[in-house]
Amino acid sequence: MKEKTKDNVYTAFVGEAKAYFRLLAYAEKAEEEDVQQVALLFRSIAEAERVHATRHMQLLKEFMVKDTDTNLEKSFQREQSISQNEYPNFIKDAEDEGETAAIMTFSQARDAESYHAKLYERAMYNVIKDIVKAYHVCQVCGYVTEKKIPDKCPICGAPKEKFQTIE
Ligand SMILES: [Fe+2]
Ligand SMILES: [Fe+2]
């Protein structure tokens, strides 16, 4: 793909991916306000934007998606960087501004990201290709474990019912 088009496809991908989440939030608001038809409309268009984002990502695959070893390494580095640099900076700014809710979500996300990094690291070094084990994801903070579901999430304290199993 030529440079300008590639940049545009990436920009379109980011825009559609953001729209997906924004429209789901709009749908939730419409449900709170009991305007069900509009809630359904937002949910439907959110789904359509997800389809668009997926299609754009298909075009970007040849640039953004490498072999699995490389993808693991890259994902590990991103998690390291976000948990050691970006989130700590965000937390500091939120502290300066006294934004307690943001301090909480940033801190828990930072902690979850460092677990993600560990899982990637483990996958990079012990080739796990032969064993297929389920992972469990905390739906409150994003903590991920391959062990059994804890009674309480070690990061946010959510009960075990809040875990979703990916298998
Ligand atoms: Fe992560
Ligand atoms: Fe959690």
Image (spheres, grey):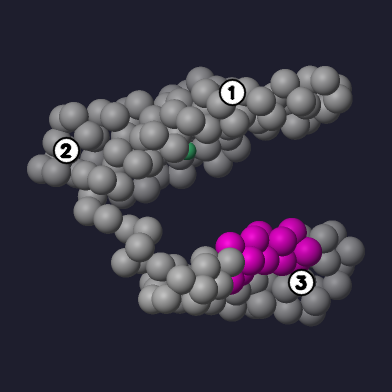
Could you tell me which residue is drawn at 52 percent across and 68 percent down?
7
Q: Which badge, 2 or 1, is on the more N-terminal residue?
A: 2
Q: Which badge, 3 or 2, is on the more N-terminal residue?
A: 3
Numbered badge on residue 39: 3
Q: Main secondary structure of the magenta part?
A: helix
Residue 126 position in % (x across, y down): 16, 30
**Which SS class for mark 1?**
loop
Numbered badge on residue 157: 1
Q: Which badge, 1 or 3, is on the more N-terminal residue?
A: 3
In terms of image quadrants, where is residue 91?
A: top right
Q: Which residue is mark 2?
A: 128
Residue sitting nearer the eye, 112 or 88: 88
Question: Is the CB of mark 2 within 8 Å of ligand 1?
Answer: no
What's the amino acid at mark 2? Ile
Residue sitting nearer the eye, 165 or 6: 6
Could you tell me which residue is drawn at 21 percent across and 44 percent down?
69
Residue 51 visible (yes or no) = no
What's the amino acid at mark 1? Gly
Could you tell me which residue is drawn at 32 percent across and 58 percent down?
65
Residue sitting nearer the eye, 29 or 120: 120
Question: Is the CB of mark 1 within 8 Å of ligand 2?
Answer: yes
- Residue range in magenta is 12-27
Q: CA distance from mark 3 to mark 2?
A: 43 Å
Residue 61 position in % (x across, y down): 35, 66
Q: Is residue 71 above or below residue 150?
A: below
**Which SS class for mark 2?**
loop
Label 1 with label 3: CB-CB less than 8 Å: no
